[in-house]
Amino acid sequence: MNEERKKVLEMLQEGKINAEEADMLLNALSRNKESDTDNTQKTGAPKYLRLTVEPGPESEKQDRVNIRVPLKLIRAGLKLASFIPKDAQTKVNEALHEKGIDADFSKLKPEDLEEILSQINDLTVDVEGKETVRFFCE
Amino acid sequence: MIPLTAKIIVKNKNKTVFWLWLPFFLIWIIILPLLAVIAPIIFITALLLLKSGRGKMIASAYFTVFALIGSLSGLKLDIESKENIIYINLI
């Protein structure tokens, strides 16, 4: 018997709550337990990062993209990226800057990636009705 | 797990279909023993360069290459436009 159920029964014994109220509390506790179990099953460690692009009603190109990348590959890629010489990394950052991306990927550590992935459940971006971009882990 | 096969399909606007099935497991039979043969050379080089600080980096890079190859399985790219279709799946 867990602590919460024990406490409810103690409250009933002490007369602080009646049998009906105790029944309601016990039911609520069992419901919480079931939903916790469901969430644990659903949030099992994701294996893949998915990116899907679906054309919207106003899209002219009608391009569809469906990319599935194993998370292991991203982690290994990040590790390998740390072996790139600093001169080359500077050139990569400059090229990204020219494209309007101000990001220094050499500073991205595996721990940061884990944090980002843990926060991505299902990110959907709608680009002005032209395309729907979905970014999620599975 | 290392990818054992790769399926590549390219379809263009002329409806020409390029279909390719690559038996990676045959390539691994050649590459994996080669990597195993290279391993002692890598470790000796790493030990020699340990003082300069590059030794650890060389050994780590070697293991990371293994990790990278091993994690390729499951990679899937499916890009479809009005005229072209590109499909790559590593199994």
Image (cartoon, rainbow, N blue to C red):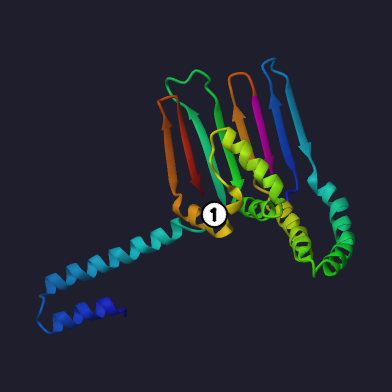
Above or below residue A22? Residue B34 is above
Q: Which residue is the site of mark 1?
A: A113
Q: Residue at x 40, y 25 (%)?
A: A129
Q: For label 1, count other residues whose C-alpha is less than 10 Å away and answer few (under 14), some (14-19) or many (20+).
A: some
Q: Quadrant of residue B63?
A: bottom right
Q: Residue at x 72, y 23 (%)?
A: B17
Q: Quadrant of residue B62?
A: bottom right
Q: Is residue B91 visible?
A: no
Instruction: Please name whichever residue, A100 or B79, is drawn nearer the observer in this view of the structure.
Output: A100
- Disc 1 chain ID: A
Could you tell me residue B77's position as x and y percent?
63, 37
Could you tell me residue A17's position as x and y percent?
11, 76
Q: Taking B59 as reference, is A56 left or right?
A: left
Q: Is residue A28 visible?
A: yes
Residue type at numbered disc 1: Leu
Q: Which quarter of the rendering shows the N terminus of chain A?
A: bottom left
Could you tell me residue A85's position as x and y percent?
72, 51
Q: Main secondary structure of the magenta part?
A: strand
Above or below residue B71? Residue B78 is above
Could you tell me residue A135's position as x and y percent?
49, 42
Instruction: Please name whichever residue, B57 or A86, is drawn nearer the observer in this view of the structure.
Output: A86
Q: Answer whether residue A14 is magenta in the image.
A: no
- Number of residue marks: 1
Q: Taking B24 as reference, is A90 left or right?
A: left
Above or below residue A5? Residue B32 is above
Instruction: Please name whichever residue, B44 or B76, is drawn nearer the observer in this view of the structure.
Output: B44
Q: Helix, strand or loop at disc 1?
A: helix
First to last magenta residue range: B85-91
Q: Answer whether residue B90 is magenta in the image.
A: yes
